[in-house]
Image (cartoon, rainbow, N blue to C red):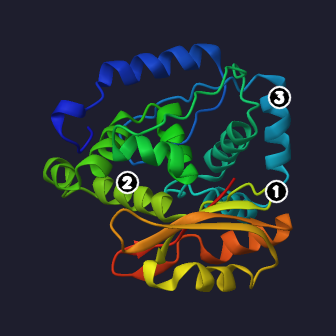
Amino acid sequence: TLAWHPRYMTSAALICAAAASFLVGGGPRAPAALPRAGRIIAAIDYKDPAVAAEFQKVQERPIELVEAEIEKSGVPVPPSLNEMDMRLMLVELRMRKAGTMPGGGKAAPKKPASYGSKYEEALWEKPAFKRLIDDYRARGNTNALNLATEYLNSPRQAADRYAGTGAYDETVAAIDAAMSAKVEQQVTSGRVAFGGFPAAMGEAAIRMTLEGFGPLASLSVDVSDDGLSCRGAAEFETVEAAKACIDKYDGVDMGLGTTLEFKAL
């Protein structure tokens, strides 16, 4: 049985039905993210030629490198996962990231102008968290999905409902790790947007700071509505300078609850 709140338990009947359906079709089982009585099969066709080709590539890698690649993607590897399941997990992660999953090709959803919840914001702004949620969805891990939603939107309510089990602790640790994972931005131009510099710095000091990475083609600075910080945009003369600036300063804690934010434009 699952050691979760009864309201969100996956029924044993559904688990058995899913397992029976898959066994008729044949093929290996997908890994489980959390210890539980049964495994939910991922929605991927392991007989697909593209999947088989990717699996062959993964099969040739030492298991230590397989685990390291999974961890680097922001998805923690459960200690109970065996080598085969670990390799299958990497196959799915690679294909999802590359957009080559069987049945793919659908138009990507459009990013909303504003977010309705912290959970929705994390899905768009935290790639590691999005990969973790995709992994939970692929394996039908409804318990972890419910917890992730409540944990981001209402941490206290999530703790009241789910705390006190090993599954809760493991899932929360995975969520926290994904949320704190550094976002690797695609920098294709010298243009960046920024926010979080103290208002007292002013444009001259901000210019000096940014020019430490290379010459600027342009810079605009505005004081935020609360009068405590500055935001603006800059254009470096080279892409390399913009990337170096983002890598150095994005996410830096400035103290007093202020964090520097740099985004490639």
Q: Of circles 1 and 3, which is in front?
A: 3
State the SS at label 2: helix
Where does the N terminus fall, quadrant-wise?
Answer: top left
Which percent across, then down, holds residue 228? 37, 74
- Label 3 neighbourhood size at 10 Å, few (<14), some (14-19), many (20+)? some
Contact (Cβ within 8 Å) of mark 1 with mark 2: no
Q: Of circles 1 and 2, which is in front?
A: 2
Which percent across, then down, holds residue 157? 16, 49
- What whole-number distance in Å separates the C-alpha atoms at marks 1 and 3? 18 Å
Q: Is residue 58 left or right of residue 118?
A: right
| Disc 1 target residue | 61
State the residue in front, 211 or 146: 211
In this rendering, the answer to whether 254 lies above or below 173 is below
The image quadrant of residue 250 is bottom right
Of pointers 1 and 3, the one earlier in the residue sequence: 3
State the residue in front, 136 or 120: 120
In this rendering, the answer to whether 147 lies above or below 41 is below
- Tell me if I can see residue 157 in this picture: yes
The image quadrant of residue 240 is bottom right
State the residue in front, 85 or 158: 158
State the SS at label 3: helix
Residue occupying the point 47% across, 39% down:
136
| Disc 2 target residue | 171
| Disc 3 target residue | 50
Residue occupying the point 21% across, 49% down:
158
- What whole-number distance in Å separates the C-alpha atoms at marks 3 and 2? 31 Å
Amino acid at circle 2: Thr
